[in-house]
């Protein structure tokens, strides 16, 4: 799937899992999901994939940073829990996250970055820095992998094993992508309508 489908479905799934009731509770969800929904595609290897992914990755990074800044301004949960693990573990989380991102960016597409290993490592790193953003990150990451499993190109879910998995149902940039992106938007609208 393409970036819009990953964003809408990832955000909707993260909001469903976290069930925030207030804006301060929603900010860690936005931060975690914005990072998790596209982090898998650091390994894009074609110009078309990179163009699509880079544009939306910047948008999601801005959303994550805006939510972090807003959380800081209102004295929200993310910054309140930031020192929970101590500065050394927070630094380890940041360093680990950067290292996994670097490794993902030089790996083959749908390899390490789409694996259960990457999910576990990167979620742990997020948890060490901002614990309240870890669940939304993991959910958005997982939805990305699940959507990609429906594509024709295999996903190396059990990396470093060379075996890839694919349901082979859809091509990444065709009708199914638009359907999933629209479904994610509808899902979000229904979630917000139900919370009013």
Image: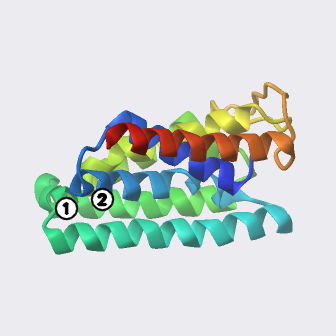
Q: Tell me which residue sits at (87%, 46%) in the image.
A: 174
- The residues tagged by marks 1 and 2 sit, at their Cα atoms, a distance apart of 6 Å
Q: Is residue 186 visible?
A: yes
Q: Tell me which residue sits at (63%, 30%) in the image.
A: 158
| Image coords of residue 84 (percent x, y) | 12, 53
For the view shown, which residue lies furthest in the top direction?
A: 167
Residue 88 tag number: 1
| Image coords of residue 45 (percent x, y) | 80, 61
Give 183 or 166, whichever is nearer the viewer.
Answer: 183
Q: Tell me which residue sits at (82%, 45%) in the image.
A: 172
In the displayed structure, does residue 122 sit left or right of residue 161? left
Residue 181 tag number: none
Q: Quadrant of residue 163?
A: top right
Q: Are marks 1 and 2 in contact (CB under 8 Å)?
A: yes
Please name the residue that numbered disc 2 is placed on: 92
Q: Residues within 10 Å of mark 2 (few under 14, many from 20)?
A: some
């Amino acid at each position: 799937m393409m970036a819009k489908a990953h964003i809408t479905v990832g955000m909707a799934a993260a909001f469903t899992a976290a069930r925030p009731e207030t804006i301060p509770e929603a900010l860690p969800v936005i931060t975690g999901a914005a990072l998790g929904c596209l982090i898998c595609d650091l390994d894009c290897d074609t110009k078309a994939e990179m163009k699509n992914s880079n544009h939306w990755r910047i948008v999601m990074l801005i959303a994550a940073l805006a939510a972090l800044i807003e959380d800081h301004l209102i004295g929200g949960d993310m910054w309140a829990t930031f020192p929970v693990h101590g500065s050394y573990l927070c630094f380890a989380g940041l360093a680990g996250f950067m290292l996994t991102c670097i490794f993902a960016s030089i790996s083959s597409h749908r390899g390490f970055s789409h694996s259960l290993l990457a999910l576990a490592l990167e979620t742990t790193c997020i948890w060490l820095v901002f614990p309240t953003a870890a669940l939304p990150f993991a959910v958005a990451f997982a939805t990305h992998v699940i959507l990609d499993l429906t594509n024709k190109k295999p996903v190396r879910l059990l990396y470093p094993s060379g075996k890839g998995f694919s349901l082979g149902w859809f091509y990444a940039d065709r009708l199914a992508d638009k359907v999933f992106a629209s479904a994610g938007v509808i899902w979000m609208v229904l979630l917000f309508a139900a919370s009013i």
